Amino acid sequence: MNNFKALFYILAFSLFSLSCANDSQEDFQEIIEIDVDEDMIPVPVTYNNQVSAIMMDNCTRCHGIPLTNGAPFPLLTFDQVNNRRDRIISRMNNAANPMPPTGLLSNSVRAQVQQWIDMGALEGE
Ligand code: HEC
């Protein structure tokens, strides 16, 4: 590299550093707007969002009012379901003695109930 070229590089580099150093703060405070796709925000698993519907679809025809087919208690309200959540998930996953008695529900339905419990068994809005 000849001297002239070297000088040029040094000058260019200094100018570059200076221009960065002089950047006003505003440049760093640019407001970043991100388009948020509402569908991409995970809906928290709560009783009201998912679990209630799962009970209505699969359980309350026996665990309802009136109780039918020998079901011992209703599963119609948050308290009724929440108070028995451990037994509920246990029987929902019990292939030998499942709830509903007709057989295991899909993995995804059972996973939602499990997730509801794991996330703190929230009632939701
Ligand atoms: C066809 C009627 C019927 C349906 C549908 C049904 N159950 Fe039951 N359930 C019963 C009967 C009868 C019993 C009592 C006998 C037994 O435990 O197997 C029972 C008992 C239970 C028990 C208490 C027994 C224990 O092991 O603690 C739980 C919890 C339960 N069911 C949860 C559910 C859930 C959750 C669903 C839906 C995913 C459901 N059941 C759907 C009839 C039903």
Image: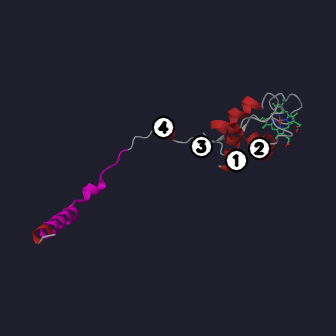
Q: Height in image: 125 above or below 117?
A: above
Q: Quadrant of ligand 1?
A: top right
| Mark sitting earlier along the chain (3/1) | 3
Secondary structure of residue under mark 3: loop
Q: What residue type is disc 2 on?
A: Ile
Q: Which span of residues is magenta-colored?
A: 6-33
Task: Find disc 4 in the rendering and name its residue.
Answer: 38
Q: Quadrant of residue 28?
A: bottom left
Q: Are marks 3 and 4 in contact (CB under 8 Å)?
A: no
Q: Going by the image, does 66 lie left or right of 25? A: right
Q: Position of residue 95 (x, y in %)?
A: 82, 40
**Residue shown at 32%/49% (left/top)?**
31
Task: Find disc 2 in the rendering and name its residue.
Answer: 89
Q: How is colour applied across the structure in the image?
A: secondary structure
- Quick one: label 1, few (<14), some, or many (20+) residues within 10 Å? some
Numbered tag placed on residue 87 in the rendering: none
